[in-house]
Structure formats: C-alpha cells, structure tokens
Image (cartoon, rainbow, N blue to C red):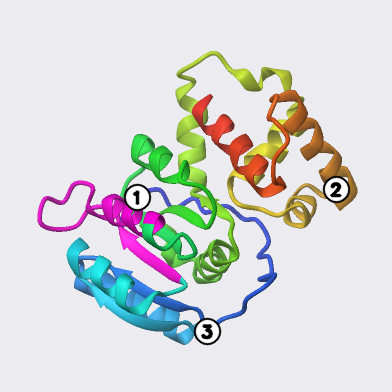
Amino acid sequence: MGGDSNAHSAPVEASDSRDHGLRVVLADDDALLREGLASLLERSRFDIVGKAGNGIEALALVRTEKPDLLVVDIRMPPTNTTEGLDVARVVREEQPETGILVLSAHVEVDHAMELLATGRAIGYLLKTRVTDVSEFVDSLQRIANGASVIDPALIQELVSAGRRKDPLAVLSPREQEVLALMAEGRSNAGIARQLWLTEGTVEKHVRSILSKLNLPEAANDHRRVRAVITFLESR
C-alpha cells in the first residue's frame, strides 16, 4: 500500500448519529488487503456482510445485503480501470442511502471529482490512509452519517495544479482554511477544534463562504457539498 502517507492530523470526531455495528460490503481484488480490511473493521465492531473480488460480485452483494457502507477499490477485474467507480455510480442510483468509500492506490483527480459530484455520504481515500486505523474508522462513520470525506492528498493535488482562474479569490485566507476542512468532511464543530475557533465563528465563516460563492438557497447540507465542489473544481 505504497504512496503518499502524510495523513492529516485533525482530531477524531465522534459519530453524531450512528455508532459501530455498521453493515459493510468490502470489494477489492487484492485478497490480502481485502481480508486485512475485514479483520481491521471487525475489530472495530463493524459487521462485514460481504466480500468481493470484482465489480460484478460487489454489485450483487450490495443489492442482496443492502449494507450501510460499501468500501470499494477504484480498479478491479476484468479491465482494472474504473470498475469500482462504475459500481459506485450504480449503487448511488439504486440505493442512495448506502454510504460509499472508494479506495485508490493513487490520486486520480478526474475520477475523484466524478465520484464526489454524486452528493452526500461519499468518500475518496488513498489506501495508505487505512494504516491510520482511528482516522480510517472515523472516516467510515462520517460517510455513514452523510458526510463527504476527501483525502488530503487529493486536496493538495488540486491546490497545486491551479488549472483555472481561482473563483475562491473572493474568500479570505481564513475562509479558505474553513472551506478546505469542509472539503475533508469536517463538521462545524470539528473545524472549530482544528482551527482553535468557536463554533459560532465557524458558522459565520461558513455563511460568508456560501454567500461569496453565490450559492443559491437550498438545504444546508447540499449547499456545503456545492461549496466543496466549487473548491475542488477551482484547483
């Protein structure tokens, strides 16, 4: 599981609606990684209801078991290209309540953007994050609770790319920090702890961000996801 291993050092947030015991389907063609993940999650009190080595098996298991979470490798047989992404797309359409975490060996910006644009309860992490057990478990819980969780390495890649004129120039440096943490799926309380601010101050920053980015009034969670997508697309 080589690759970028500079894990973000944010404090672990408590699950806000569900605890361990979440039902999980694991899909990865690497049998050692698949069994290692299963063992890790079972020790953390997750319920592994199915394991698959390819996209067809993964989709069949999700349809049968209707799990709380699907953890899927982005590249699986037979073509080892986008099978995991294809499975995620179908699951999101058929079972929108199922949280999805896509694991990748490398940062793949276009694939990640397509995945994250599908909305809530979605995650994209590098496989190296699995080694930080508490952070990985926390990420799964937050996805199950509806958050979008984005690997810090992807954010760094997007920031360094600077492909387009930056629509975030209207934001203050502090607002950009807040938005970057929103992109990692952090709640207002989690952002406040990370930046040593009060939760009320973070709420003001979030309102200002949504206003400056000209996001129309909608459900608050949806506006946050739109803000995060704006952040990612601007890099």
Query: Residue, x 59% and y 56% (percent of image)?
Result: 147
Q: Secondary structure at mark 2?
A: loop
State if disc 2 and disc 1 touch (CB < 8 Å): no
In the drawing, does residue 216 fall left or right of residue 62? right
What residue did someone put label 3 on? 21
187 lies above or below 224: below
Image x and y of residue 194, in percent: 74, 52
Q: Amino acid at mark 2?
A: Leu
**Residue 40, quarter of picture:** bottom left
42 lies above or below 108: below
Q: Amino acid at mark 3?
A: Gly
Q: Earlier in the sequence, mark 1 or mark 2?
A: 1
Q: Secondary structure at mark 3?
A: loop
In the drawing, does residue 89 fall left or right of residue 202? left
In the drawing, does residue 146 fall left or right of residue 212? left
The residues colored magenta run 69-93
**Residue 2, quarter of picture:** bottom left
Query: Residue, x 74% and y 31% (percent of image)?
Result: 209
What residue did someone put label 2 on? 197
Q: Nearer the viewer, mark 2 or mark 3?
A: 3
Q: Nearer the viewer, mark 1 or mark 3?
A: 3
Q: Earlier in the sequence, mark 1 or mark 3?
A: 1
Image x and y of residue 205, in percent: 81, 37
Q: How far apart are the alpha carbons under marks 1 and 3?
A: 30 Å
Q: Earlier in the sequence, mark 2 or mark 3?
A: 3
Q: Nearer the viewer, residue 133 or 54?
A: 54
215 in magenta: no
In the drawing, does residue 162 fall left or right of residue 114? right
- Is residue 54 shown to the viewer in this render? no
Q: How far apart are the alpha carbons under marks 1 and 2?
A: 33 Å
What residue did someone put label 1 on? 3
